[in-house]
Image (cartoon, helix red, strand yellow):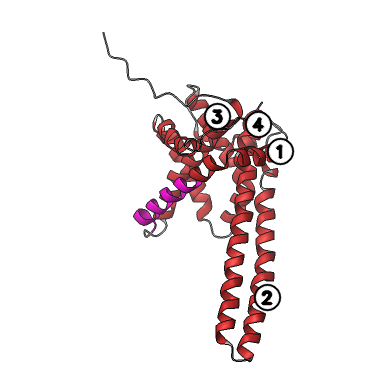
Amino acid sequence: MEMQRVDAGRGIAWLTEAVQLLLANPAPFALMGLIVGAIAMVPLAGTLVLAIAGPALYGGMMLAAAGQQSGRPPEVGQLFAAFQQPGKAGPMLVLCLPAVLAGVIVLALGVVLMGSALVAAGVGASIKADALAGLSLGGGFLLFLLVALAVGLVSWASVFFATPRVMLDGIEPMRAIRESLAASAANWTALLLFAVCLMALTLVLGLLLGWIPVLGPLAMTTVLSPIYAAGAFLAYREVFAGAAPIAPPPSPATGN
């Protein structure tokens, strides 16, 4: 399957078309998002489960989105399709490795960079150079943020297309990760707009709902996770399958 290059504006269109796709049958997708949100709310264990099984669960939502786009009604149980299909769970769980590796790298860099900054700040304070100490801390923190952002973006790009490729096409996971990185690099402007628009939507929902204890974050995940999954599916569909944008749902037939 040959990779396609798309215009930057398609990054926005993937999200708007995802919303359009979900609104055609919102209940099953909302329930899937609710389940993911409920898992995320479990202290410590929820974060660990999503770190490992997140690609598999999002792959299930992408499978449901693919069915919806093809005219097959989605089912809530498709969220766990990777664990129900023989031989699918292992490859989907492998896709957690980039995020795990990114976490280890960021943690190690945090210790090194922030530790060096603290040492420099301590030296500066010992010689009464308070300005130098503050600059050392600020510079180390800024460098850490930039490196962490770069590592996070590479980790995200490595699984953005790989998740639907493994789930829907049965591609070997390491090959899918390499292809995802190449496709993301070739379409970085579209992915950047996709990410920026998704973050803007997250910010808006956070302002509206984030202040509500428990239910606010749960509602945000219920809405955002299916949108992300459907958007990533549509991106994969266009970049790897060369498919045209989805058509609007047909108008209800009128009686004769």
- Picture quadrant where residue 216 is located: bottom left
Instruction: Pick whichever of labels 2 and 4 is earlier in the sequence.
Output: 4
Element at badge 1?
A: helix
* Residue 37: x %, y % from top left: 49, 49
Q: Residue at x 34, y 54 (%)?
A: 208
Element at badge 4?
A: loop
Left/right placement of residue 104 relative to residue 77 reads: right
* Residue 250: x %, y % from top left: 37, 20
Q: Residue at x 63, y 79 (%)?
A: 118
Quickly name the residue at label 3: 238
Task: Answer few, some or many: residues within 10 Å of disc 4's Cα (few below 14, many 20 plus, some between 14 and 19).
Answer: few
Element at badge 2?
A: helix
Kind of residue at badge 4: Gln
Left/right placement of residue 132 relative to residue 194 reads: right
Q: Which residues are magenta?
A: 195-210
Q: Quadrant where the N terminus lies?
A: top right
Task: Answer few, some or many: residues within 10 Å of disc 3's Cα (few below 14, many 20 plus, some between 14 and 19).
Answer: many
Element at badge 3?
A: helix
* Residue 45: x %, y % from top left: 59, 56
In-front residue for pair 95/132: 132
Distance between the alpha carbons at the discs numbered 4 and 3: 25 Å
Quickly name the residue at label 2: 116
Instruction: Pick whichever of labels 3 and 2 is earlier in the sequence.
Output: 2
| Discs 2/1, front | 2
The answer to the question of whether label 1 and label 4 lie on touching residues, with beta carbons closer than 8 A, is no
Task: Answer few, some or many: residues within 10 Å of disc 2's Cα (few below 14, many 20 plus, some between 14 and 19).
Answer: some
Mark number, residue 173: 1
